[in-house]
Amino acid sequence: MGQGAVNGGSLDSLPSDSVLFPWPCKAIERPTDMEMQMSKLVTIFGGSGFVGRYIARRMAQKGWRVRVAVRRPNEAMFVKPYGTVGQVEPIFCNIRDDASVRSVMTGSDAVVNCVGTFSKGGKNNFYAVQHEGAERIARIAAEQGVGRIVHISAIGADAESDSAYSRTKALGESGVLAHFPSAVILRPSVIFGPEDGFFNRFAKMSRLGPILFLVGGDTRFQPVYVDDVASAAAKGVLGEAKPGVYELGGPDVSTLRELVEVMLNVIKRRRLVFNLPFWIGSLVGVGFDAMQAITLGLFTNSVLTRDQVRSLRHDSIVSDNEKGFSDLGIKPVALEAVIPNYLWPYRRSGQYAAIKESAKNLRKT
Ligand SMILES: NC(=O)c1ccc[n+]([C@@H]2O[C@H](COP(=O)([O-])OP(=O)(O)OC[C@H]3O[C@@H](n4cnc5c(N)ncnc54)[C@H](OP(=O)(O)O)[C@@H]3O)[C@@H](O)[C@H]2O)c1
């Protein structure tokens, strides 16, 4: 297999099975025509999302045919070059509908479910997607005799939680296990990578003014690299992971405030980081939720929901009671090795920040 170094990046500093995409990346090993004819089929629900696309790419590299089952296949065409012609296909599916799931899953050897939401309202809400949708996929997979299922949940999944996100994640897990007891369930902490909604969001916010407001600044996270989650999912599909629950966290545990400070350091911006009390966070969340309701969804609350504030009260770190990366033989990548590769556009001078810095030193001498 050849290795590629794009944009001056190098793979040498990363574990050998790590694929940084679309930054430093390994060249795709193309399966032969014969392998393609004989290859197995995996259907990835939500395979165009942040996590799903990395799983799709990994399975294509393994020579599997990949169906990317999403509601907007026309917006998922970017997955096609992950494999040879016809190997990776976006296909319409809505996991809220039995017939749609049944049709897209036909003939699959394995199934991965990466569909999730942060929205409590509308048709694609927590219950419809994370509970009923997840259970529907497992039920139909069992009916169709699919060999393996990998389900992406989240750390904090708890049927007793005050957060609907965490509650429906727990209901989804039980629904999956009721129909498919040999499922592999992955519970990641917060996930980082070029398309993440975490560091990118805080980096965007930091461009707006001198103060960054946080809710839950003392809450602890264990950020995990998106391709490490994909690697774990691929092992589930390939039968290299024992059935059961795996909690996935990166090598380091940090508070939200510490993570934001790391991000600010990477983008070379100085900001006052101000931690708001939870009760103020709840009021802000209620306000933005109300705006979404009043505008009948024309405004989507992607700033802060009341449910997110409830989740932020709890740490998102792996527990000692569940399996993890070590049981899968995966060494997770550290945050600092990856985020500079994609957060540089938020620097004042973008890709020229380093050169400007060194020019400044030249003038001094
Ligand atoms: N990102 C994180 O930090 C994080 C942390 C812990 C756990 N997780 C979990 O990891 C999983 C993947 O997260 P993500 O960040 O990759 O999510 P994402 O980027 O929002 O992707 C969601 C995917 O699901 C598809 N989808 C949504 N509703 C659908 C429906 N009704 N039927 C079919 N497809 C549907 C979307 O495509 P269309 O819109 O075209 O349908 C998209 O491909 C989720 O279960 C999430 O809860 C994520």
Image (cartoon, rainbow, N blue to C red):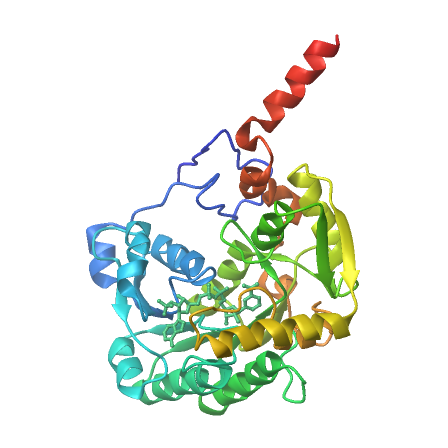
Q: Residue at x 60, y 34 (%)?
A: 348
In the image, is 186 to the left or to the right of 46?
right
Residue 240 seen by the camera: yes
In the rendered view of the protein, which quadrant contains the C terminus? top right
Residue 160 in picture, x, y percent from top left: 67, 89
Taking depth in this image into account, of 322 and 7 the one nearest to the observer is 7
| Residue at the far top in the pictured view | 365
Q: Is residue 326 left or right of residue 89?
A: right
Report x, y in % for residue 136.
Answer: 39, 87
Q: Nearer the viewer, residue 50 or 138?
A: 50
From this view, report whether residue 363 is shown above or below residue 318: above
Closer to the camera in the image, 291 or 99:
291
Q: Where's residue 237, x and y in %?
A: 43, 68
Query: Residue 279's image quarter?
Result: bottom right
Q: Residue at the location (52% across, 33% down)?
A: 9
User: Residue 65 sits in which quadrant?
Assistant: bottom left
Q: Is residue 319 visible?
A: no
Q: Is residue 167 above or below residue 77?
A: below
Q: Where in the figure is residue 350, as x and y percent of width and height?
A: 55, 33
Q: Residue furthest front?
A: 294
